[in-house]
Amino acid sequence: MPKMKTKSSAKKRFKVTGSGKIKRKHAYKSHILTKKSKKRKLALTHAALVHPADEKSVKEQLRII
């Protein structure tokens, strides 16, 4: 039986940290930036971690489990 492929969309959006947590980027940073404050845009620049409730789903898509 062939190997299971990872979901390409998930592969592009998530990275696994050394401790096994999953990093993600913030949404709302691609367009219509003029009305957003500098503080808000700067906060959206930094990476965040995937919420524990969603971790299982993302790991299945990445075929980590």
Image: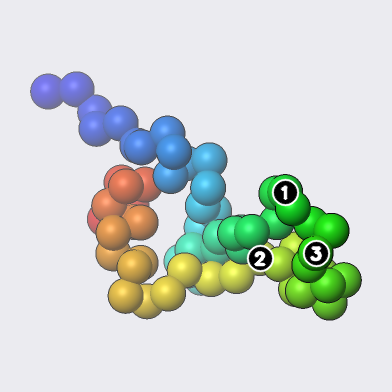
Look at mark 3 in the image and give the residue it sits on.
35
The type of residue carrying mark 3 is Lys
Give the alpha-carbon distance from disc 2 to disc 1, as whole Å: 18 Å
Which numbered disc, 3 or 2, marks the residue that appears first in the sequence?
3
* Rendered view: 5 above or below 57: above
Crowdedness near tag 3: few (<14), some (14–19) or many (≥20) residues, C-alpha within 10 Å: few
Q: Residue furthest right?
A: 38
Q: Residue furthest top?
A: 2
The type of residue carrying mark 1 is His
> How far from the left and from the top, in percent, is residue 58?
35, 56
Look at mark 2 in the image and give the residue it sits on.
47
Horizontally, residue 58 falls left or right of residue 33, namely left
* Rendered view: 57 above or below 37: above
Q: Nearer the viewer, residue 14 or 4?
A: 14
Residue 61's tag is: none
Crowdedness near tag 1: few (<14), some (14–19) or many (≥20) residues, C-alpha within 10 Å: few
Look at mark 1 in the image and give the residue it sits on.
31
The type of residue carrying mark 2 is Ala
Horizontally, residue 41 falls left or right of residue 6, namely right
Q: Nearer the viewer, residue 1 or 41?
A: 41
Give the alpha-carbon distance from disc 3 to disc 2, as whole Å: 22 Å
Question: Where, quadrant-wise, is the N terminus in this rendering?
Answer: top left
Label 3 or label 1, whichever lies nearer to me, is 3
